[in-house]
Amino acid sequence: MTKGNPDTRFKPGQSGNPAGRPVKEHTLTSCVQALLDNEPDKVAKGWSKKGMTGAQMAAAAIVKKLTKGDGALLKEVWDRTEGKVSQPITGAEGKPLSLTIEVVSEKAKLDDWLWRLQAVWNWAIRKIELDGRDGVRYSSMQFRNQLAGHGKKIEIPSHTIQGVLRTAHDAWMRRFKGVGGKPHLKGRRNRLNSIPFPDPIRRPQGTCLRLQGVGLVRFHKQWLPEGAIKCGRLVKRASGWHLCLFIDAEPKAIPITGDGQIGIDPGYRKESLLTLSTGEKIPHPKELERLETRLAQAQRGKRAKVAARIQERIANQRRDRNHKLSRRLVSENAVIVFSKDKIKDIAQRGRGPVHFGKHVASAAHYQLRQMLAYKCRTGGRSYIEVDGRDSTMTCSNCGGLTGPPPGLSGLAVRQWRCKGCGSLHDRDINAAINTLLVGVGATLQRGIIR
């Protein structure tokens, strides 16, 4: 938020606005500044609640509270810090008054940093590619020092520039090892959205944390695990700026509530998100389906920021769901076997009313598999992925291939009876049981289960 421009505000006593209320900029900063430029107590009393914005009401409440003690104190601190008030202010009565104001000067500074670091990223990507054609190779340490001394020229800490160079070098190393794709250049449609801080960071004092080159960063109060903060990264998302901290701490163990063995068959278009070999069917929350109407309206109206915010909300809900579900499965089961389907092929399958692309994205099974893998590894559990081929057609009782036919035509068959043994099977539960049988057989051969 920017501080109100005196030229865009009415003066006290001017016709049409006798209270001196800001007109063009109804931000909290400009409202408080308007109160301080005029007589705070009179202006705060002169503002009527009818027709006031939320920022004006908040500013009036702040000024009324401070003028009861020492109104000149706020003006003195405001003028001294130019609106950058981040520490509690003590009034005449000795009570702490916390004034939290979002200041655009820092956000504008970070946006400017992103623009300059984007040029550094593009330079690094092209340099590694072109020098690689000539047979020139760099180690991580050598490449980080390619722009030594440029920090003062572009007014960005040198270690932050080194962090961007290291990220670009690591991206190319993953490409050379065959575990990642070719890194792309950044532009208007694919902008750089994070700023690295590779140096250790001091633990926060209250709700403020100091970053090199940025200064004090205020954040919402939350619990942080004990341990040294190794490094950090500022990430710009649709909802604002977020600080990601990398803390050297011991992971909290997932409580063990059972030692079962389950096979999991993923679902896409039907009501169940997952089907377990125990017969339980976990319903699909359908986060995307609930908000797709609002998302489509924002996209058709060319409201890019609103659409981005809705997409971020959907991703947050989906991630939260997968975290809770994976934690529950790891807590209850010692062996988890997941049917690994070919997601890309399923997403491209189908025509007309039968299509899977949106449903595959909404299910987010790949993210769930990743969470199960690392939580089982840290929790002392066994996690196995098996090929899901013929898991639906195979009878889990006798092993005969007597199930429904493959392809889109066979999806309508939800229950079937085995022609060999006469067993009646639910399509998804039978596939989950076969997944468990294959996975347990693999673990027994490898000696994982003792």
Image (tube, rainbow, N blue to C red):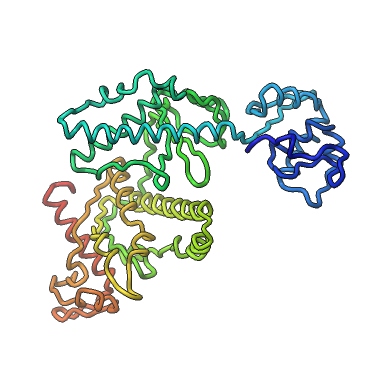
Residue 258, x across and y down, in percent: 33, 51
- 176 to the left or right of 327: left
Looking at the image, residue 1 sits to the left or right of residue 307; the answer is: right
**Residue 301 horizontal side relative to residue 124, left or right:** right
| The residue positioned farthest toward the left in the image shown | 445
Q: Pick the residue in front: 275 or 423.
A: 275
Q: Could you say where residue 159 lies in the image, as x and y percent from the top left?
A: 39, 23
* The quadrant where residue 197 appears: top left
Q: Report the quarter where the N terminus lies.
A: top right
Does 174 sit left or right of 241 as displayed? left
Disc tally is 0
State the residue lying farthest toward the top: 149
Vertical placement of residue 185 versus 348, above or below: above
Toward the viewer: 51 or 13?
13
Give above or below for 354 relative to 1: below
**Relative to 2, is 392 above or below?**
below
Q: Which quarter of the figure has residue 166?
A: top left
In this view, 20 is above or below 393:
above
Q: Is 241 or 7 nearer to us in this picture?
A: 7
Q: Residue at x 17, y 59 (%)?
A: 438
User: Which residue is pictured at 39% across the width and 30% down the height?
Assistant: 249
Q: Which residue is pictured at 15% across the width and 30% down the height?
A: 135
| Residue 234 spot, x, y in % from top left | 46, 35
Query: Which residue is depicted at the point 26% across and 32% down?
Result: 127
Q: Measured from the top left, where is residue 403 in percent x and y?
A: 19, 76
